[in-house]
Amino acid sequence: MYDAILTSPSRFRLPPLSSRSLRLSRFDSKNPSSSCLASVSTSGRLSKAIVAATAACSGVEEAPRPENRAEFDDDAPTSIELIPIASEEQFDRIIAEAQQLEESVIVLWMAHWCRKCIYLKPKLEKLAADYYPRLRFYCVDVNTVSQRLVSRAGITRMPTVQLWYDSRRQAEVIGGHKAWLIVDDVRKMIENDD
């Protein structure tokens, strides 16, 4: 059982989480009688426990589950490794398959020496789990593929995250700021594509 202190309905501090139990408490110094303690144990992912405990402490009802979001499925992965693209031929094949299936593809263009790319990749792997299996995520190390592919994709800075649909680049996010800001922009890019 882990304790978390809720400082507002949407902000709380958590210790490292390895258990599927959570006790969430909120203390209101101005009105101690409104303090709340919620204990939640789940057999699914811990995020459900956080949502339920936050709802219990904030006095609002739990939001309904999104229909196509994997984050609320008990068997859904928490992270999905980005599939590496190692050649221009593989890239063309992936884009052609996505066009046939009428699916979008997310591609992270990165370099193994780029610190921002290294920080961003695991966060995108968690985002990939949110959209699994509806959307596939790939990564390309610009140092291992032909420069022609990099130029064709219009990559000028790294990390760059692109949304491809119908064999064309539909949108992109060029990373130059914090990884969580880039992930938020990528999520908006995906939602705008729907």
Image (spheres, rainbow, N blue to C red):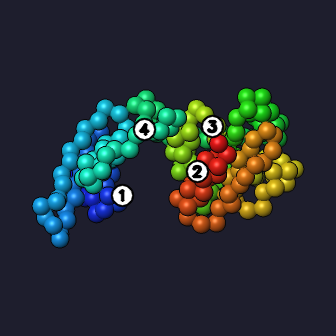
Mark 2: which secondary structure? helix
First in sequence: mark 3 or mark 4?
4
* Residue at mark 2 to residue at mark 3: CA–CA distance: 12 Å
* Residue at mark 4 to residue at mark 1: CA–CA distance: 17 Å
First in sequence: mark 2 or mark 3?
3
Q: Taking 89 as reference, is 54 above or below it?
A: below
First in sequence: mark 4 or mark 1?
1
Q: Amino acid at mark 3?
A: Leu
Mark 3 or 1: in front is 1
Q: List x then y, in percent, for residue 48.
A: 35, 41
Q: Which residue is mark 1?
A: 10
Q: Amino acid at mark 4?
A: Arg
**Image quadrant containing the C terminus:** top right
* Residue at mark 3 to residue at mark 1: CA–CA distance: 28 Å
Q: Residues within 10 Å of mark 4 (few under 14, many from 20)?
A: few
Residue at x-position 31% and y-position 46%: 61
Q: List x then y, in percent, for residue 166.
A: 79, 38
Q: Are marks 4 and 1 in contact (CB under 8 Å)?
A: no
Q: Amino acid at mark 1?
A: Ser
Q: Quadrant of residue 120?
A: bottom right
* Residue at mark 2 to residue at mark 4: CA–CA distance: 18 Å
Mark 4: which secondary structure? loop
First in sequence: mark 2 or mark 4?
4
Q: Taking 171 as reference, is 95 above or below it?
A: above
Mark 3: which secondary structure? loop
Q: Residues within 10 Å of mark 1 (few under 14, many from 20)?
A: few
* Residue at mark 2 to residue at mark 1: CA–CA distance: 19 Å
Q: Which residue is mark 4?
A: 65
Residue at x-position 19% and y-position 62%: 27
One can see residue 14 in this view: yes
Q: Which residue is mark 2?
A: 187
Q: Which residue is mark 3?
A: 135
